[in-house]
Amino acid sequence: MLEPLKLTIQKSGRLFNQTADILKKCSFHLEYVDRSFRHVFKDFPLEILLVRDDDIPSLVHRGACDVGIVGLNEVKEFAASFTDFTESNQPEQNCQQTQGHRLHYECHLGFSRCRLSLAVPVEAEYHDLKWFSQKKIATSYPACLEEFMAKQGVEIQVVPISGSVETMPAMGVADGICDLVATGSSLVQHKLKEVATVFHSEAVMVSAREQLDPEKLKLLDLFCGRVKGVLKAQSSKYVMMNAPRVKLNRIMKLIPGLRKPTVMPLYSGELTFSDIHELKNTDDYVAVHAVATEPVFWSTIEALKNLGASSILVVPIEKIID
Ligand code: ATP
Ligand code: ZN
């Protein structure tokens, strides 16, 4: 019997809902999540294991799971804690690697965007990173912080903390913090100001691609194909409109991330009264159908209307398979 592809995801927390939503769109519906840490599916050999997010890079790296969905921050911390890991600035083109072991970036998933940042008390007279010299910095990302500060040539004292990092300066445990920031509201609440960014993060899919046998690799490619199809569809819209033929070039330029549009003559056999009333001479109009691969804003629709486009429809796409 074919061994299933093992996917590991966060059991509960900030990553779970959007991960489950993508999986559902790939036809992997997670039911009874509270009761089970392991899910299997009938029509695709996939096993999903729900764990704490901190463990995901290590599980994939050890080969206990074949692929995982996790924040880039966790992958970076895992990588930085190995002295023989190498990394590039372009994760898609490279891997996190130790001797003989690799974590391969399959794709960025575009959700749970945040950044690992340094923050200091609002009243601190901060000019540059030298402020941190010999100071205590609380963080749940000690390896990333040490690596960053070493590159900047600033010596610090790292205070490893597993949660509520923002409270540490007020408690006198640390002078500053290095923590994940999304909106920054938590920093404001704790009277801290963000002063530098270590790196930006979002959810990513990582795999043990290079350790997989050919059968597993086939499954991984099929699975990644489904996920990428869903991601592409999520960021795309199908746009339809009737457009004046003479304005076609200008209209095309307005459709964001336009992919090969279809331009068709309008049916001019039996026209309804409103067709005639709206378009006057239908031969001057064509129907345009196109996939926009970037968000279609109201301002774009208004600009299309100003160029004479009418009956504009912008509809969601479920899957895009190229
Ligand atoms: P677990 O119980 O699985 O260990 P956790 O408490 O460590 O969960 P969450 O708070 O659920 O983790 O965050 C999961 C991920 O969400 C983070 O690792 C990060 O990639 C992302 N994230 C997005 N925005 C934020 C934010 N404002 N603060 C923290 N994490 C964020
Ligand atoms: Zn965690």
Image: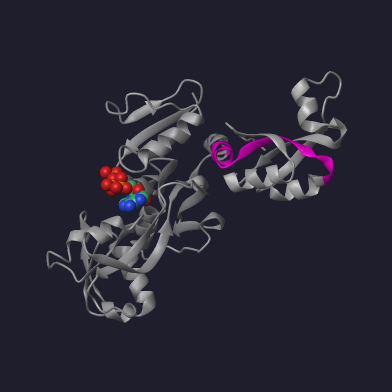
Q: Position of residue 7 (x, y in %)?
A: 42, 37
| Above or below: residue 169 compared with residue 304 | below
Q: Residue sitting at 38 percent across and 36 percent down?
A: 17
Which of the 4 image quadrants contains residue 259? top right
Seen from the viewer's position, the closer of residues 210 and 173 is 173
| Above or below: residue 149 compared with residue 207 | below
Which of the 4 image quadrants contains residue 30? top left
* Magenta region: 229-246
Seen from the viewer's position, the closer of residues 223 and 123 is 123
Q: Position of residue 77 (x, y in %)?
A: 35, 58
Seen from the viewer's position, the closer of residues 265 and 210 is 265
Magenta span contains residue 167 = no
| Above or below: residue 317 compared with residue 148 | above
Q: Residue furthest front?
A: 277
The C terminus is located in which quarter? Answer: top right
Horizontally, residue 161 falls left or right of residue 67, namely left
Q: Is residue 295 visible?
A: no
Horizontally, residue 105 falls left or right of residue 76, namely right
Q: Residue sitting at 53 percent across and 58 percent down?
A: 94
Q: Residue sitting at 77 percent across and 26 percent down?
A: 275
Q: Position of residue 307 (x, y in %)?
A: 74, 46
Magenta span contains residue 237 = yes
Q: Residue sitting at 54 percent across and 34 percent down?
A: 219
Which of the 4 image quadrants contains residue 53? top left
Colour logic: one colour
